[in-house]
């Protein structure tokens, strides 16, 4: 009577026909029958129902027939399948049929399969039996994104979610990144392996360009990207992309994406996040609930199944974490910082103007002068334009000087432009913990924008202050461009001077009221000389 008891429990919970049929695997007729009994006997709680009552309400005509047959031990069949991936239902039936059942008869193979299928459906074991524990992890990007709000400028940045799932246990890993490029793709795998404390035998991605690409244009053959293959070699695993047009190859990943969209994005949609750390902490809390606090119909969670049947089958993690390495040749600026991926890292001030080698990994930035390590920084993420400055790199004279490249030097120059420019330069210098970090921005504004446009720079600075804006080179440049466009607009036309010859008055030509011009005869002195 287990099925009718489960149906009645769901009916009392107010579940719909479709939900009950999907969860129990019964027919709509069974649900209707249970609803009728509940209504007739005014049942409100399962605590008031005994097994004898259920037997009386739902007599099983097959019970006397099945009593003559030996009942298979499907629990042991499931144990054998989990322990031996080559164990089949046919082998289980043969073992069952060959056993001594006394006076009872064994079921035939077809009935054995039907009973086993019913057992699998009722115990939510379909996905478990279709996948081998520890064999594969399916990975993909989630379609919807999450917005990050810059706490300084208010600018919105998209964050993309990566999801990985072990199809046997259903354990999910999820992580947010600022883009879907190769470094983010690789780091997501590393984080997932760390969470599982092991490595599956296979990684099954979809076909994004971060995982594989066609060998040549128009070719159907796909090749694993070099960096992705390096990660697989480091963790001793294999990459087998899902086949194009074969959705069943990635069904578990699509199911995991759907769960993340509902249980993660759905819960976090109305929250505001300003840093990736805060966003990932919130995602971790939601994923932890999915893995640890959402049991199936048997009361078993994803993590329970993973620990019991799958964790020991994973490969061991290597001693060192995989790190993607990128090398760059970068020149040290006048403010003794190098600029890598829109972030700034200090070096000893004596190296200003030098060309240095820089090694970038996902976690560290290492600067070399030839073969000598100059310094190391933690890699900056998030908002562009951040500074990582070590105290020992700052020259002593920057603690307070009045000469070149000092606060006084920049403010004195800005004062010559006007009070608005002085206020903007002061704002830029004041917002840096180490004042020298703002020198380059001040130099770009005063030299780059103001050298030939002093009045326009002052006007743009005043407009920025009136708006309460955030002073940067780009903002001021944009305002100056708008001012130039207004000044360059067409001026009203002025009529040309008249070319009509005016009338002469008394030997003079009248050009206007009270204005006369003598003609040539006035200057003729021939007659005077003749009279002399």
Image: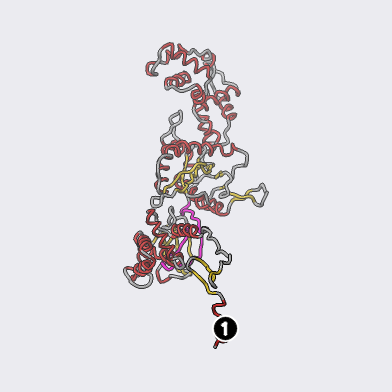
- Residue 496 point in image, percent of width and height: 55, 63
Q: Is residue 390 visible?
A: no
Left or right of residue 224: residue 462: left
Q: Nearer the viewer, residue 450 or 220?
A: 450
Residue at the far right in the pictured view: 218
- Residue 167 point in image, percent of width and height: 52, 38
Disc count in the image?
1
Residue named by callout 1: 527
Left or right of residue 280: residue 87: right
Vertical side of 334 occupied by 183: above or below: above
Q: Is residue 323 magenta?
A: yes
Vertical side of 145 occupied by 459: above or below: below
Q: Is residue 284 magenta?
A: no
Q: Residue at x 50, y 53 (%)?
A: 183
Q: Nearer the viewer, residue 170 or 417?
A: 417
Color encoding of the figure: secondary structure
Q: What range is drawn magenta here?
A: 318-342
- Residue 480 point in image, percent of width and height: 46, 59
């Amino acid at each position: 009577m287990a099925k009718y008891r489960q149906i009645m429990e769901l009916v009392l919970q107010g579940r719909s026909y479709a939900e009950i049929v999907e969860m129990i695997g019964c027919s709509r007729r069974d649900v209707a029958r249970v609803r009728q009994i509940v209504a007739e006997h005014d049942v409100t709680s399962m605590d008031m129902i005994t097994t004898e009552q259920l037997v009386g309400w739902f007599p099983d005509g097959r019970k006397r027939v099945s009593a003559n047959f030996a009942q298979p031990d499907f629990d042991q069949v499931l144990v054998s399948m989990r322990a031996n991936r080559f164990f089949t239902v046919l082998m289980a039936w043969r073992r069952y049929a060959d056993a001594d059942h006394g006076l009872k008869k064994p079921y035939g193979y077809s009935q054995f399969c039907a009973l086993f299928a019913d057992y699998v459906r009722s115990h939510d074991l379909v996905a478990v039996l279709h996948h081998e524990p520890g064999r594969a992890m399916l990975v993909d990007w989630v379609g919807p994104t999450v917005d990050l709000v810059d706490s300084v400028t208010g600018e919105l940045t998209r964050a993309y979610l990566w999801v990985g799932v072990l199809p046997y246990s259903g354990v999910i890993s999820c992580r947010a990144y600022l883009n879907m490029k190769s470094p983010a793709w690789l780091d997501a795998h590393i984080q997932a392996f760390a969470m599982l404390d092991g490595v599956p035998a296979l990684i099954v991605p979809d076909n994004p360009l971060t995982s594989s690409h066609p060998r040549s244009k128009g070719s159907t053959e796909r090749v694993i990207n070099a960096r992705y293959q390096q990660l697989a070699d480091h963790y001793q695993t294999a990459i087998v992309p899902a086949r194009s047009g074969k959705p069943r190859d990635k069904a578990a990943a699509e199911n995991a994406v759907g769960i993340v969209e509902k249980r993660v994005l759905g819960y976090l949609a109305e929250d505001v996040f300003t840093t990736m750390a805060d966003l990932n902490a919130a995602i971790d809390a939601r994923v932890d609930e999915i893995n640890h606090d959402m049991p199936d119909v048997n009361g078993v969670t994803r993590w329970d199944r993973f620990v019991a049947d799958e964790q020991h089958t994973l490969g061991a993690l290597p001693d060192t974490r995989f790190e993607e390495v990128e090398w760059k040749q970068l020149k040290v600026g006048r403010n003794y910082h190098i600029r890598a991926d829109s972030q700034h890292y200090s070096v000893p001030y004596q190296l200003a103007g030098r060309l240095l080698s820089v090694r970038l990994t996902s976690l560290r930035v290492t600067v070399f002068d030839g073969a000598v390590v100059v310094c190391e920084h933690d890699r900056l993420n998030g908002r562009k334009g951040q500074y990582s400055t070590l105290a020992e790199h700052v020259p002593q004279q920057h603690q307070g000087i009045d000469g070149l490249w000092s606060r006084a030097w920049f403010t004195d120059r800005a004062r010559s432009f006007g009070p608005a420019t002085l206020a903007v330069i002061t704002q830029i210098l004041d917002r840096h913990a180490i004042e020298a970090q703002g020198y380059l921005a001040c130099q770009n504004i005063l030299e780059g924008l103001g050298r030939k446009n002093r009045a326009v720079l002052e006007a743009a600075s005043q407009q920025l202050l009136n708006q309460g804006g955030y002073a940067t080179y780009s903002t001021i440049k944009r305002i100056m461009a708008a001012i130039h466009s207004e000044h360059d607009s067409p001026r009203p036309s002025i009529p040309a001077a008249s070319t009509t010859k005016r009338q002469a008055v008394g030997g003079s030509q009248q050009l206007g009221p009270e204005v006369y011009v003598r003609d040539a005869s006035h200057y003729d002195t021939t007659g005077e000389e003749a009279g002399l």
